[in-house]
Amino acid sequence: MATATEHIHDEVRELIRRRGVDPISDQRSTRALIDEVISHYEERVPTSSLPPLMDRPNAARFIFDSLAGFGPLQRFLDDREIEEIWVNGPGRVFVARNGVSELTTTVLAPGEIRDLVERMLKPSGRRLDLSSPFVDALLPDGSRLHAVIPDITREHLSLNIRKFVVAANGIEDLVARGSVTAHAARFLEAAVVAGLNIIVAGGTQAGKTTLLNTLINSIPPRERIVTCEEVFELRPNLPDIVAMQTRQPNLEGQGEIRLRRLIKEALRMRPSRIIVGEVRQEESLDLLIALNSGLPGIRRTVYVIGSHHDHLPHRNQLPRPEAHRSPRQRPGRLARRRSLAGNRPNGDVRGFNAGRRVDGRRSTLGVFGGGGPRPCDGTPARC
C-alpha cells in the first residue's frame, strides 16, 4: 500500500505536468504547488481511505528534493559540514566530514543513481554514455561532479560530488581559519603582487582550489586575467577577467576543446596573467611555451596537482614525448628546464604546497622555489 508521501508525490508530479511548471528553474512555484497539494490531501483524509500524513515538513522536503533537487542526495548537499559525497552503488553512499569518511544509511533504488546524474548534468550540457564513459561537470551550487559508468566500473555507476565548503575570499580568511600563519600570508600576498610564477600543489581535497582562489583575489585590479579550466571552479572577484573551460566532443566526435587549446587561445587575449587549472598532461608543453612567449609584461599563474617534493620534476617530464620520458632526470637537465621559467625578469617560480593535517584541517604546509622545498612555519626567514 502506498504511503501518504507517495500519494502526494504522484499528485504533485501530475499537477506539474499539467501546469507546465519547471521544478528546477521555478522552485518558488514548485514549493507553492507542493503546499497546495498537501493541504488538499489533508482535507480529504478524514472522509476517505487515504493514509494520514504524519510529518508534513519532512514530506514536503522529500517531495521537493525529489522533484526540484537531487533526491536523497540533496540533504547532503545542503549540509554545510559535508565536504564530499560519493556513491559506489545503490546501498553504498558515503560522505566526508572534516576529512573523515562515513557510510550513510541512504539506499538508492535501482536506476536512481543514473537518473540523478542525468539531472545533475542537464544544466551543463555534458553527457555520460558509452562513447563518453567519464564526465566532469559543475553543479549549480558550485560543487564539482565526476561520474563513471560500467563497463569502466565493475558493476555500478560511480559518482563523486566535491563541495567547496570553505568560504575564504582572501588571504586574511585563511589566517582567521588557522590554515596559514600571518607571516606566511604576507609572503603569499607579496609573491602574487610581485607577479611571480606560482605553482599550487597538493593531494586531493588538500585545499588547492581554495588557496588559489584567495591568491587570485590578491592580484591588482588593473590587470587582465584569463583562466583556463577543465570545469569552472575558480571564482575570482576581479573587474577584468575572462574564464574559459574545456568542452566534450559531441555525438559525432567533433567539437572537443582541450585544455592546451585554451592556453593557446589565452595568449591572444592580451592577458596580464594566465591562470591554468589542473595541469596534468600535454598542456604542460603549451604552458611552458606561454611562459616563454616573450610578450611584454605577461605573468602566469600555474595551478597543478602533486606533492611539493616531486612536482617540479614531474612538470618537466610531462611535456616530453612518451617514448623519450625517463623515470629519473639528470640534475643538470632539470636545472636547465627550470631556467625556462626563470630566464625572464618575471619568470621566477614559487610554489605552495597545500595539504591536510592530522586533525583534518587544511593548511599551507610548505613553500618551494629554485632552492627546493622547505617547510613554511610562518617565519619570514623560512617563508
Image (tube, grey):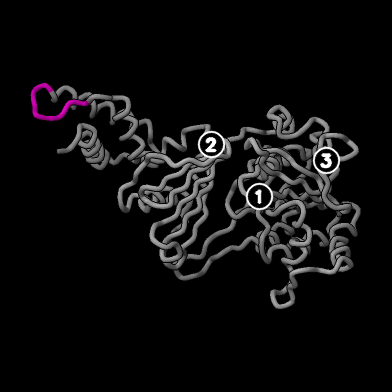
Give coordinates of residue 110: x percent, y percent. Answer: 30, 52
Q: Find disc 1 in the rendering and name its residue.
A: 203
Looking at the rendered structure, the number of numbered marks drawn on it comes to 3
Q: In this view, does 381 lie to the left or right of 247?
A: right
Q: Residues within 10 Å of mark 1 (few under 14, many from 20)?
A: some
SS under mark 1:
loop
Q: Residue 97 carries which label?
A: 2
| Residue 236 in which image quadrant | top right
Q: What element carries label 2?
A: strand
Rendered view: 268 above or below 351: below
**Disc nearer the start of the sequence (2/3):** 2
Residue sitting at x 53%, y 47%: 144
Name the spot of residue 51 as percent of width and height, x first.
15, 29
Left/right placement of residue 347 relative to residue 86 reads right
Could you tell whether 52 is left or right of 354 in the image? left
Residue 123 appears in the rendering: yes
Residue located 25% across and 40% down the image: 13
Amino acid type at circle 3 is Val
The residue singled out by tag 3 in the image is 193
Magenta residue span = 46-53
Mark 2 vs 1: CB contact within 8 A: no
Q: Which amino acid does label 2 sit on?
A: Arg
Q: Which image quadrant for residue 378?
A: top right
Q: Which of marks 2 and 1 is nearer the N terminus?
A: 2
Residue toward you, 192 or 270: 192
Amino acid carrying label 1: it is Gly
User: How busy is the neighbourhood of tag 3: few (under 14 within 10 Å), some, or many (20 plus)?
Assistant: some
* Most frequent secondary structure within the magenta stretch: loop
**In this rendering, does residue 274 appear at all?**
no
Secondary element at tag 3? helix
Q: Residues within 10 Å of mark 2 (few under 14, many from 20)?
A: some
**Inter-mark Cα distance, 3 to 1:** 26 Å
